[in-house]
Image (cartoon, grey):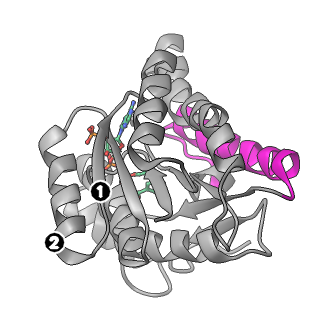
Amino acid sequence: MPAALVTGASRGIGRAIALQFARDGYDIAVNYRSRRTAATDVVETIEAETSQFGHAVQGDIGDLASIRACIEEIADTFGGIDHIVNNAGINQHCYTPDLSPEEFIHLLNVNVNGAFTVTKIALPYLEQSCVPEGPSVINLSSRLAHTGADYEPHYAASKAGIIGLTKSHALEFSPDIRVNAIAPGFIETDMTDKTASEDEKQARRETIPVSRLGKPEDIGQAAAYLRDASFVTGETLNVNGGQTMW
Ligand code: NAP
């Protein structure tokens, strides 16, 4: 069976991507950092709702030794890796005067170095993949990579970095492995629940042409498209209900 690794798949967007890929016939490595029960729930849902195999794998994407152990465990368990979704990420609302250099580096380490390192360590497995659509990497960027954000400069910088990383890896790994990114707009998850009040969500809704906030499943569908789109590489797919158009 083809296998996909989704980092940060215990909840939110990662969970939706994991379930979408399982419904599409992939076995899933469900990476998580700390919420084991939530990751186990994703595995149980995969196995209850599809005929695919799921496996929860603890691993801190901000730590090299942890990523190495995680990829080794996945390769041993699944016998290979065909697709990677570098979804794990963190966010922090903070204006520059209050943002320490250590906080800046920590966020970039998880959001950018993490994606780079997971891909680098898993590369030999992707290179051995024989899936008909070809192996791929999908990185999670953000609408804020394009617009910037006055309240989270490190987050916007990290997501712009993801676009540069995506294009560079697409060039470097062609023609064997496709590498694409998704830039979501406002998606309702724990990440946005933490930082936006109901009033702010309503105000946001009014700026979105399709008149709703995004759901994690919207990103699951976009990831499935990029996984299968064998003539698309180095691209960033904007999924934001038309809030910003480039
Ligand atoms: P979320 O609800 O906060 O979930 C984050 C996930 O990442 C969790 O599974 C968490 O694991 C995992 N994670 C965090 N740090 C990790 C680490 N060091 N190592 C391994 N896993 C880690 O986030 P989300 O809203 O689903 O966002 C997913 C991705 O989409 C992120 O890259 C985010 O930047 C991007 N994005 C989100 C939005 C949005 O509106 N929600 C918009 C644009 C881009 P635990 O559960 O174990 O802590």
Picture quadrant where residue 147 is located: bottom right
**Amino acid type assigned to the residue bearing label 1 in the image:** Gly
Coordinates of residue 190 in the picture (x, y in percent): 25, 52
Question: Dot 2 lies on which element?
Answer: helix
Q: Residue at x 58, y 61 (%)?
A: 183
Q: Residue at x 68, y 49 (%)?
A: 128
Looking at the image, is 51 positioned above or below residue 137? Answer: below
Answer whether residue 155 is magenta in the image: yes
Looking at the image, is 207 positioned above or below residue 6? Answer: below
Question: Dot 1 lies on which element?
Answer: strand
Is ligand 1 closer than 8 angstroms to the Cβ of mark 2? no
Is ligand 1 closer than 8 angstroms to the Cβ of mark 1? no
Q: Residue at x 17, y 39 (%)?
A: 36
Alpha-carbon neighbours of circle 2 within 10 Å: few (<14), some, or many (≥20)? few
> Residue at label 1?
54
Answer whether residue 107 is magenta in the image: no
**Amino acid type assigned to the residue bearing label 2 in the image:** Ala
Instruction: Tell me the tag on residue 48.
Output: 2
Magenta part of the chain:
147-175
